[in-house]
Image (tube, rainbow, N blue to C red):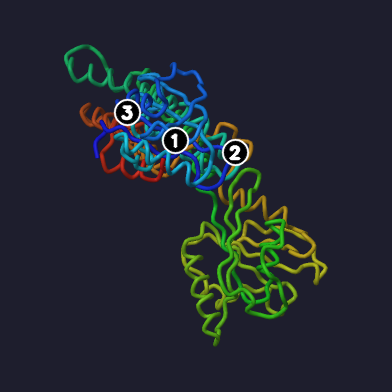
């Protein structure tokens, strides 16, 4: 496959719909447009046209839009055909484009060409995919901000502050005999403080954005009949799980997506943890343990009406994987007459709730958002991914290392090298520093046609 090929793909989901769109990009678009439409449409003007087969007979009719290079999404000539959304007719249209010399586009290849042709950087391209996949309104807003370049602009400002520092360092290295006490210069200390503050602000905005993108994974676990499925139903606001008095009703993992004030949360209801003779229940318990290993937090549900529920037993602790954050949920307080309250300072923290009456559920929701580190009023969240957070963390650590070199009066060269590496780490976010392997991983996760 070559980046000089003219590529084509259906850019709308397969199936029966009112409209489907075929996108074509590349140098051969003008020739292909003449063959498909009988003529080249005027640039950026919607034209009603018949889409023609090799014999000049219409395959379909609809709207054609032509965007000549470089004023297009990809920076190449682009043709978009909007026709009727039927499986057969869209396949015929795509087959005709391939017959005329197009190659079927790889996933994300249109966005990849936009990046390669300077129409967007990698962070913006990733934000396009994140906008499509957004599970909540807050996640969509964060993705739009990054898609429009806000995240990239913040990174560029940070890189510019580092560049200013490097200028002073290089001057101190190149002119060592000048009467400049670089190490004690208030301007350098002040610039370092500004850089650190800028890192703190952008890391928080990016962390919120990554949380909105990736969501929070919560596993509901506990003994049979503790009320795990009832708690899932209450948090989901719907009867998504079967609830019975018979122990062992839940045999498989039940997943439910919910939004907690914009935070996407995946709730997983699991089989009751006990020694089971039934083979199907044993498999359910095995799956429950596997999900707990991958959880961001476990809600371990205890039956408040059961004897011994007030004591955190060793056998229950043995059910849980080490290192996964845990919250105890004392359920069924409607049967004991207790009031909902949270003891969040303990280890592990404990909340009293009733999945039946709803008492204490709002406290639980607040606790989940807090434990995720989510701030619902953080309107400045930026669409970001884990690789962005990793690059920011490495860059910040290098800046702190440079500050330490300054304080310890180490050689200028060490200070300069740390700043250089910090700039390189920031460049990984926007694609100034990248690799073919990284590009393949990023754009390979996109939809075909995007």
User: Do the residues under discs 2 and 3 have CB atoms within 8 angstroms?
Assistant: no
Regarding residue 347, the answer to whether it shows in the image is no
From the top left corner, tell me how far across and down residue 438 is, in percent.
Answer: 30, 42
Q: CA distance from mark 3 to mark 1?
A: 14 Å
Regarding residue 64, the answer to whether it shows in the image is yes
Q: Secondary structure at mark 1?
A: strand
Residue found farthest to the top: 179
Q: Which mark is residue 26?
A: 3
The residue nearer to you, when weighing 423 against 219, is: 219
Within-10-Å neighbours for mark 3: few <14, some 14–19, many 20+: many
- Which of marks 3 and 2 precedes in the sequence? 3
Q: Is 132 displayed left or right of 237 in the figure?
A: left
Which of the 4 image quarters holds residue 256? bottom right
Q: CA distance from mark 2 to mark 3?
A: 35 Å
Picture residue at 47% right of the left edge, 32% below the top: 202
User: Do the residues under discs 2 and 1 have CB atoms within 8 angstroms?
Assistant: no
């Amino acid at each position: 496959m070559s980046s000089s090929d003219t590529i084509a793909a259906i850019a709308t989901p397969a199936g029966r719909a009112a409209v489907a769109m075929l996108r074509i990009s590349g140098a051969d678009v003008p020739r292909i447009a003449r063959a498909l439409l009988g003529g080249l449409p005027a640039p950026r003007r919607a034209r009603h046209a018949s889409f023609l087969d090799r014999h000049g007979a219409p395959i379909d009719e609809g709207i054609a839009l032509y965007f000549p290079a470089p004023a297009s999404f990809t920076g190449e000539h682009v043709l978009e055909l909007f026709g009727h959304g039927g499986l057969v007719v869209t396949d015929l249209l795509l087959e005709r484009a391939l017959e005329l010399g197009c190659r079927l586009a790889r996933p994300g290849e249109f966005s990849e060409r936009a990046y390669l042709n300077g129409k967007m950087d990698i962070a913006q391209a990733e934000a396009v995919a994140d906008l499509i996949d957004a599970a909540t309104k807050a996640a969509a807003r964060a993705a739009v901000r990054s898609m429009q370049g806000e995240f990239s602009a913040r990174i560029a400002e940070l890189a510019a502050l580092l560049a200013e520092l490097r200028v002073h360092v290089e001057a101190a290295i190149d002119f060592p005999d000048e009467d400049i006490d670089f190490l004690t210069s208030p301007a350098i200390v002040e610039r370092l403080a500004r850089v650190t503050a800028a890192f703190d602000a952008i890391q928080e905005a990016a962390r919120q954005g990554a949380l909105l993108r990736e969501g929070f994974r919560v596993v509901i676990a506990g003994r049979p009949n503790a009320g795990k499925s009832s708690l899932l139903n209450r948090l989901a606001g719907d009867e998504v799980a079967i609830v019975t008095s018979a122990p062992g009703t839940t045999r498989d993992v039940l997943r439910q997506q919910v939004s907690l004030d914009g935070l996407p949360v995946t709730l997983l209801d699991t089989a009751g943890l006990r020694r089971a003779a039934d083979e199907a229940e044993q498999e359910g318990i095995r799956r429950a343990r596997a999900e707990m290993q991958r959880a961001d937090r476990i809600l371990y549900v205890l039956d408040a009406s059961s004897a011994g529920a007030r004591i955190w037993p060793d056998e229950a602790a043995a059910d849980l994987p080490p290192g996964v954050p845990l919250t105890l949920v004392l359920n069924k307080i409607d049967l004991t007459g207790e009031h909902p309250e949270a003891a969040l300072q303990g280890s592990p923290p404990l909340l009293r709730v009733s999945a039946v009456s709803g008492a204490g559920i709002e406290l639980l929701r607040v606790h989940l958002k807090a434990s995720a580190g989510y701030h619902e009023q953080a309107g400045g969240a930026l669409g970001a991914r884990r690789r962005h957070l990793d690059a920011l963390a490495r860059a910040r650590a290098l800046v702190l290392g440079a500050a330490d070199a300054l304080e310890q009066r180490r050689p200028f060269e060490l200070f300069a090298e740390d700043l250089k590496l910090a700039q390189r780490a920031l460049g990984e976010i926007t694609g100034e520093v990248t690799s073919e392997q990284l590009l393949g991983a990023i754009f390979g996760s996109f939809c075909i046609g995007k």
